[in-house]
Each structure stands twice: as C-alpha cells, then as structure tokens.
Image: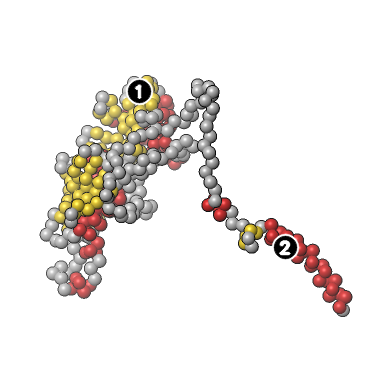
Amino acid sequence: MKCGLEKRTLKWIPLALATAVTLAGCARDGYYHDRNLDYTEAAPATPLVLPETRNTQRYRDAMPVPQVAVQGARIDGAADIKPPPSLTVGSGLEPDYVERRQVGDQTWLVVAADTGTVWPQLEAFAQSRQLGVQESNASQGVIVTSQATLRLQSALRSGSSEVRCEQGGQSVANCLEALEQYLGARSASVSSSWTAQRLSQEQTVQIRQQGDEWEVIIPQSIDRVWAELDHYLALDFSVEGQRDLLATSPENHEFLVEYMTATERGRNPLQIVISPDVRRMSQQIRLALQPDGDQTILRAINASERSFSASDQRELLERVSGYLR
C-alpha cells in the first residue's frame, strides 16, 4: 500500500516543477509583472533630426495643419476656481457637428472638430466644387477662390472651429449653405489626420472678483461671444420658473434672463415657512457683455428687488461661461 502512494506522489513532481518555473518567469520581485508600471518609467527619446544636407524639395509637410493664432492672453491674478461642468451628453446642449452663428449681416459656421481636422475638408470642398483655387495658405487658414474666400480659425469652445465664406468682407449665403451641407454629410466619418494637433496656446475663459462683484474675462471679440451665448442661452434657458431667456438686445449686447439661484433652490421647508415667500422664487438678471480691447467682459447684474449675493452671481456666471469652454 505504501509503495502505491509513493508512485502517485512521484507522478505529480514534474507538473509541480513546471508550474513553479512558469510562475517564476511571470513574476518580478515576488509579484506578477504589471506592464502598466513600464509606462511610468518611460523616458522621452531624442527627437529625430533630418541632416542639413538633405534635399529640401523632397521633404515638406504632407498634410499641413493650420497654426491659427489665438486672440487674447492669459490674465494675471484671476481667481483659481475649478472649471464649470462641461456640456455633457444628455444635457440637451451637446452641439451638432455643424451649426450656424449670426451677428447682424455676418454669418459663419461652427464645426465640432479642431482646425487640423477641418482644414483637409475645406480643401476637398474647394476641389470637389471646382471653385478655382487661387491661393491656399494652411498657416493662415485661408483658401482664396475665384468665387469666395474660405477662412478657418479656432472657435471659442475647445476643440471646435469657425469657418467663414466671404467675398469683399460680406458673407456669401450660397457658399455657406453648400459648405454646411458638405461638412454635415461627412460628420459621421470624421477622422483627424495623423499630423493634426491641438493649438499650443489654450483659450482661457477666466473669472475674477472685482470688489464685491464677479466678472468673466473672455479673450475673444464681443461679436463672437455674443453669438455663442445667444445660441446656448436659447437652448439652456428654457425651463419656466427656473431659468428662462426673456429678451435679447444685440445692440447693447445684453440678455435678460429669469433665474432661480442656487441659494433659493437650496432653501429648506422651514426657511420657506418663516420667509415672506411661500415658495421658491426666480428673479430677473441682466447678462451684460462689454468690450475691453481684444477681449470681452461678462457681468451678471441684478434686475429685480430680490437679494443677489456675490456667491449667487458667481454661480450664474460659472454656468454661463461654461458654454464657452
């Protein structure tokens, strides 16, 4: 009986040795090798440099990306705050791939893709419509044709672009309509070229406190800011009793909204009972834009008799400025 047990034990010895050798090869310092750690220890390699003796006619950008300059500069001394929530899916504010913006008689398109993605599409549009390209400058984001001039620049929202189709400084309606249809038809299969990169300088929308008041500093021209706010306020401020867009004044660059502040929304039943108001109330507030050199100032001004604290003002401005991020 004892001999039989010894034979069975000996049969398992080769399998145990093979398992031990296999596990030893997969371990490091007594643990299984987690290759994610390799990435934290990786160091950047030296950039490749072409020799000076190369034939410069043979080496150039195969897919040039517009290096569109960003207006405005970072403001020193701005308040250090967390950014407002982005326009996430399901909020009803996610942009379409191509949308129109208009201020007065100026109309342009906003495309939900960076300039490196949109530029090849503009080139393909000009060629497919046989517009007679006279000049194409990727660094300037300009395509000059015999019928109109296409202009590309980064939009206010990060990762988006603005496209204009003009002739003599005026928007060309039929060109914009054709371009809108062309870009919209390709929205499902958009892919950025391997050379496309985000702009190196960020557009910075910042909020700062001036005495007891809060204001938003937007490093863009007032017309561009007005067009974006007009678009998103019409979409977002459409809940009666909580937030509602009452009126717009393009001439004065102002919006009149009805808004229930976070302070009012947070009142508990006991606070409501002992206050003159038997229910939570909204109030009217003016959102005013003011040009300041090459940037724009956004302020929230109380237009009602209800209290409007600095924290309420900041909360509303953070929400509205979130449309521009």
Q: Nearer the viewer, residue 290 or 106?
A: 290
Q: Kindly identify the residue that appears in the image at 75 percent across and 61 percent down.
A: 18
Q: Nearer the viewer, residue 52 or 239?
A: 52
Kind of residue indicated by mark 1:
Thr
Horizontally, residue 70 falls left or right of residue 32, namely left
Whether residue 215 can be seen here: yes
Does label 2 or label 1 sit earlier along the sequence? 2
Q: Kindly identify the residue that appears in the image at 42 percent across and 27 percent down.
A: 128
Q: Nearer the viewer, residue 60 or 148?
A: 60
Q: Kindly identify the residue that appears in the image at 27 percent across and 53 percent down.
A: 79
Residue furthest to the bottom in view is 1
Residue on which the image places disc 1: 145
The quadrant where residue 35 appears: bottom right
Residue 133 drawn at (x, y percent): 38, 22
The span from disc 2 to disc 1 (Cα, nearest Å) is: 72 Å
Kind of residue indicated by mark 2:
Ala
Residue 253 drawn at (x, y percent): 18, 43
Q: Nearer the viewer, residue 309 or 162?
A: 309
Disc 2, SS: helix
**Crowdedness near tag 1: few (<14), some (14–19) or many (≥20) residues, C-alpha within 10 Å:** some
- Placement of 184 over or under 136, stated as above or below: below
